[in-house]
Image: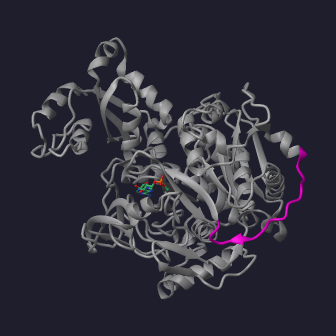
Amino acid sequence: MDSQVEQTPHEKHVFPPSPEFRDAAVAGPDLYAAASTDRVGFWADQARELLHWHTPFSRTLDWTNPPVAKWFDDGELNVAYNCLDRHVESGNGERIALYWEGEPGDSRAITYAELTADVKRAANVLTELGVEAGDRVAIYLPMIPEAIVAMLAVARLGAAHSVVFGGFSADSLRARIDDAGAKLVITADGGWRKGKVSALKPAVDAALEPRGDLPAQDTVTNVLVVRRGENEVGWVEGRDIWWHDAMAAAEPEHQPLAFPAENPLFILYTSGTTGKPKGILHTSGGYLTQVAFTHRNVFDLRPESDVYWCTADVGWVTGHSYVAYGPLANGATQVLYEGTPDTPHSGRWWEIIEKYRVTILYTAPTAIRSFMKLGRQIPERFDLSSLRLLGSVGEPINPEAWLWYRHVIGADRTPIVDTWWQTETGAIMISALPGVTEAKPGSAQVPLPGISVDVVDDAGTSVGQGDGLLVVTEPWPSMLRGIWGDEERFRETYWSTFGDRYFAGDGARIDEDGDIWLLGRVDDVMNVSGHRLSTAEIESALVAHHFTAEAAVVGASDDTTGQAVVAFVIIKESQKADAEATDVAAELRSHVAKQIGAIARPRDIYVVAELPKTRSGKIMRRLLRDLAEGREIGDTTTLADTQVMRIIGDKVVR
Ligand code: 6R9
């Protein structure tokens, strides 16, 4: 680690904005004042200022029936029009919307006029294939411009997309297609990853194969296939269509219709505490208002001069709000990169920043920590002087990583915004405002103007200063509107703990300055490299293997990925002979990757004879976490068999 940042950072170590940054900043302290005088009116002003409404709204918020919120609900808009056509109409058609960089080094610069033209054609293609307002379309694509085109074309028609991360398996894709009842799947032959083409189409083919009780094949009528990898693909006549053929044949003009503000925009699946992923539902007007507002003010965006780069994949919520919708609603110029940070060399990201003169970088702590490990000599080989603001998202950023980020990447100049939010919140909720707030390494700090949060104890009482649970106390424009097809789970998960205050699932602390520190999840959700994974989902994948009798999964802290998946499994008696002849850990790791996706693959698998359980049969994951992290085992008195930890511990030689 670098010597300058080795010292233990002190909570009191703060970084005030430079006078130059403060004087020119997009956001000023007046935003806090305006929002605290009239919170709801503040959002109405933002919605009117930042978006074009085909039909202006007269009602800002309807919260008469919590937890069902309606924002701007008598207004109408078209989300794609707001992200595209209006910029062309206002004379910015020649501005670059996307600087796309393919992993092998091919690139494309796409203007707002060109992107608008592509989305119009794509909307006509989808209409031809029978997609109408209210339908769902699954998108399973690499990070190529067509991913953005596909999302916006779906939005333009008033349909809802469900983007499935390209790293997810056929089974995960199938579950998501079924749950949403998707009519169409948009995919690619393959995409470039780690120096080679990684095929995507076979997973779609497998997902749509008729199999037992799963009805995916029934709802999906067509598969649109983008050619990217040039790899051979299987083809189902009558179902599969090449994207480029359909685009070439489509009408170029398309009139966007206006849809109600509460029309669904997308469903995005995320891990919860039980096995089945939740389809988080977002709607149009409120969502777009808050992503545009936060993207402009948190990133100090100047659309005419900035080059913004958010490194998230569109398969995650960060890619929805801060690659697709926020930047495009604001008419920003952004970089989109297809591949991995270390291909073909470990300076690839810094090379891209130098090439496009990137001014704003938004990434995850896990990436920063892996660059720290490689050493500062790699970024130092590139000219990063264009950078003027850095952002962090996905997990708590440790002060060491924060200081390294600012020092090595930001040349001690750039403000850093540590942004806390969730798939469910749709947009950033807690963050410093650059130019206004003094930055404090490791703390996400303060709720944004118009957002009200609190830290409460188990009984729901505000802790004032100290540790507790994070809640959002007032409805916000980009809040989730439900869990697709499961109203009960929506109420139960977020609204049953503290009444009409939203329970986020994160622990938090308020320090003596009133700044908020996020302390990680308080439920059985892990955070691996900024990706949410459910212990229950991985456990059920493990027990689906014929070797496994029982499994327990914990998230153990990891220097690079934040947390790592560690699994403890008991092998069935009947399988013991077979298992002994196999590399069980390797077998189960690849089984989990196949069932869920490579991101869920356990780092360690321990075969054990017992699992620590309470007398009521609950697995005590806390004890397994102690073991996985090499700590002294905590209190074992509630175990049914107090000897069990010693027996397991003997197995775990680290
Ligand atoms: C945007 C996103 C949400 C969970 C959230 C929390 C963690 C995200 C954070 C952070 C500390 C930050 N999280 N940002 N923790 N500081 N700045 O990541 O959404 O994938 O739904 O994850 O991520 O635990 O509850 P999502």
- Image coordinates of residue 342 in percent, x first then y, are 56, 34
Instruction: Name the quarter showing ligand 1.
Output: bottom left
Residue appearing at x 59%, y 82% in the figure: 60
Q: How did the renderer colour the structure?
A: one colour
- Residue 354, visible in the rendered structure: no
Residue appearing at x 42%, y 51% in the figure: 272
The quadrant where residue 197 appears: top right
Q: How many marks?
A: 0
Q: Nearer the viewer, residue 302 or 582?
A: 582
599 over 527 or under it: above or below: above
12 over 101 or under it: above or below: below
Question: What's the magenta region?
Answer: 249-263
**The stretch drawn in magenta includes residue 251:** yes
**The stretch drawn in magenta includes residue 345:** no
Q: Is residue 613 left or right of residue 154?
A: left
- Residue 230, visible in the rendered structure: yes
- Image coordinates of residue 634 in percent, x first then y, are 15, 44
Residue farthest to the front?
A: 213
Q: Nearer the viewer, residue 269 or 327?
A: 269
Quadrant of the image for the N terminus? Answer: top left
Q: Nearer the viewer, residue 121 or 410?
A: 121
Q: Is residue 94 left or right of residue 8?
A: right
Quadrant of the image for the C terminus? Answer: top left
496 over 583 or under it: above or below: below
The quadrant where residue 106 appears: top right
Q: Nearer the viewer, residue 59 or 375?
A: 59
